Amino acid sequence: MPLTAKVMNPAFAGSTKAKMSTLEATEQIRELPGDEKEDVLFDTLFGLRTIELNRPEKLDPLNGSMIRKIVPRLQEWAKSDMANVVVIKGAGEKAFCAGGDVTSLALDNKLGQEGQQRSIDYFALEYKLDHLIATYTKPYVAIMDGYTMGGGVGLSLHAPFRIATEKTVFAMPETTIGFFPDVGASFFLPRMAGATGMYLALTSERLKGVDVYYAGIATHYIHSTSLPALERRLAELRFKDYDSLDERLNLIDSTIEEYSTGLPHDQEMLLSGLLRKDIDACFGAETVKGVIGELKNRIANAKDESSAKWAEKTLLSLKSRSPTSIHVTFQQMKLGRNWSIAQTFQREHQIASKFMRHPDFTEGVHALLIRKDKTPEWAEPSNLEDVKRPAELTTPFFEVDESEKLKLLTDGDYKEYPHWRFGLPHESHIEAVVKKGNRTIPEVVGYFVREKRGKQGVKEVVEEVLARRAYSVEGGKAAWRGN
C-alpha cells in the first residue's frame, strides 16, 4: 500500500480533491505594441515544449512582455495532443529568474495614480500566469538553475517538478524592498515544516544548492551538467492515450530521478539541528513582538555561541526591514495556511495593490536598486519596535474588495498541493509514522527509504528530523517529542 494511504497527514488530505484547470480562458492575453522581441524563446522537440526566459544580462527578470508571450503558449499546449511535457528555464549561466522587474514598477509608482495602476495591472497579469501554472493540466518542469527569486519563484514553486542544482539560489527578498512575499508564497511557505516558511518570509534568507532540495522547495536535485541530457530524455518520452495524468507524472518523476547524480558530501544541511530548533522556537511565536522577544532571549541567554550569533544577526536583519512589510508578512503567513490556491492569488493581488499605493515599496526599491545607498526611509512607524498596535497597521492590507477581485484564467483550485508526493518526506509525514508507535528509529528511516524507492536525500532528511523530534522508549520503539 502506498505511503499516501497509510500515513496521510490531515495537512495533505486535500490533495485528492484538487480541481485542476477546466475552463477555457475567457480573457485573451496577447502581446502589445512595444513588447520586447525575443525576451522569451520557445522550442519544440518531439513531445517537449520549452520556455526559456531570455534576458540573461539582467538575470532573466520577469516583465509584462514576457508574461504576454508565455500565457497563450501554455494555453495552446494545454489543448495540444502533441505536447507531452513543458519545461521552463532561464538563459545564461547565472539565473533561472531573479525576480520581477520591480525597478520599472517603482518608477511607475512615482508618477502618481496612473502609474500605480499600471503596477497593479502588472501584478494581476503575473498572478494569472502563476495560477495557470499552479493548476496546469500538462506535466510542467521548472529548472531552478541559478538565481530563483521573487517572480522566478512564482514560475517554479507551484510546479509538480522543481529541479535544483548546485547553482540554485532561492530567496523571497520582498521585505528588503518594503513589499511582501507574493507569487503564491502565502500558500507555499506556511505549509513548510515547522516555522521555516515564516523564517524565510520575514528574513529573506537565501538557500543555496542542495539546501533548496533538503528544505522541500525543490523536488529533485541534479548537477547542472546533466540538464541538457535530461531535457533530451524528456522529449523522447512516449505516453499512451489512456495514461492518466498521474501515470504520466510518475513516469516523468522516475525519468528525472535517473539523472540524479548524488548529493554533495561536503555540505551539511543548513536548516537542521540547533539552527532549526532556534528557527522553530523564535519564528513559531504568535506575534512579531514574540519573535523579537525570543531572539533577544537567545542573544542574552543562549548556551551555544552560534545560537546567540544567529539571533543577533537575525534581529538586526529584521530591524532593517520595513516595519509595515514585516507585520503584513507575519499576518499573511498566519492567514495563508487556510487559503486555497485561487484565493491565494486573489488575496495577494489586493495586498499588492495596497503596497503600490504605500510609500515603503517605492522607497525600498529606490534605496536598494536605484539610489543603491541601502538606507531606506520607511514610513511611520519607521522602527519595528515602534509598532504598538499591529492590527491597526495590518488590517487595511487584508480588507477584501469584492468588486476588485482578480479574475483568474481558469477555475482550477485546491487547498493542498496535489503533487506533493514527488518531493522529500514532509516532517508531518515522519511524525505520523512515528506516532503509530510500532517502529524503532532505524525502522522509520528504512520505511521512508523504501517508500521513496531509494530517492536521494530521504535518509538524510528523515534522520535529521528524528534526531530533533524523536526518542526511543521502552522496547526500543520511536516516540515523538512535543514542541
Image: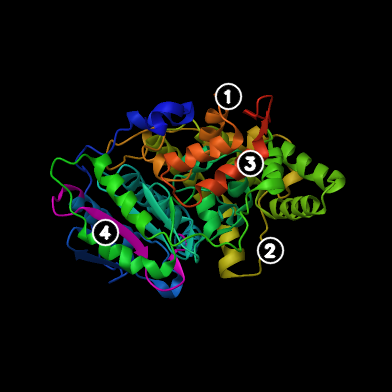
**Do callouts 4 and 1 mark residues in contact (Cβ within 8 Å)?**
no
Q: Name the residue under label 2.
A: 375
- Residue 247 lies in the magenta stretch: no
Q: In which quarter of the image is residue 153?
A: bottom left
Mark 4 burial class by Cα count in 10 Å: few <14, some 14-19, many 20+: many
- Spatial CA distance of label 2 from label 3 is 20 Å
For marks 4 and 2 on the same chain, the one whose residue lies earlier in the sequence: 4
Instruction: Tell me which amino acid carries mark 1.
Output: Gly
Quadrant containing the N terminus is top left
**Do callouts 2 and 3 mark residues in contact (Cβ within 8 Å)?**
no
Indicate the position of residue 114 as horizontal and vertical percent values.
Answer: 42, 54
Residue in view at x 48 percent, y 28 percent: 9
Q: Which label was assigned to residue 1?
A: none
Q: Which label was assigned to residue 234?
A: 4
- Spatial CA distance of label 3 from label 1 is 40 Å
Q: Mark 3 points at which residue?
A: 327
Quadrant containing the C terminus is top right
For marks 3 and 4 on the same chain, the one whose residue lies earlier in the sequence: 4
Q: Nearer the viewer, residue 469 or 208?
A: 469
Instruction: Tell me which amino acid carries mark 3.
Output: His
Q: Which of 212 and 120 is in front in this view?
A: 212
In this rendering, the label closer to the viewer, 4 or 1: 1
Taking the image as drawn, is residue 427 in sight? no
- Spatial CA distance of label 2 from label 1 is 54 Å
Mark 1 burial class by Cα count in 10 Å: few <14, some 14-19, many 20+: few
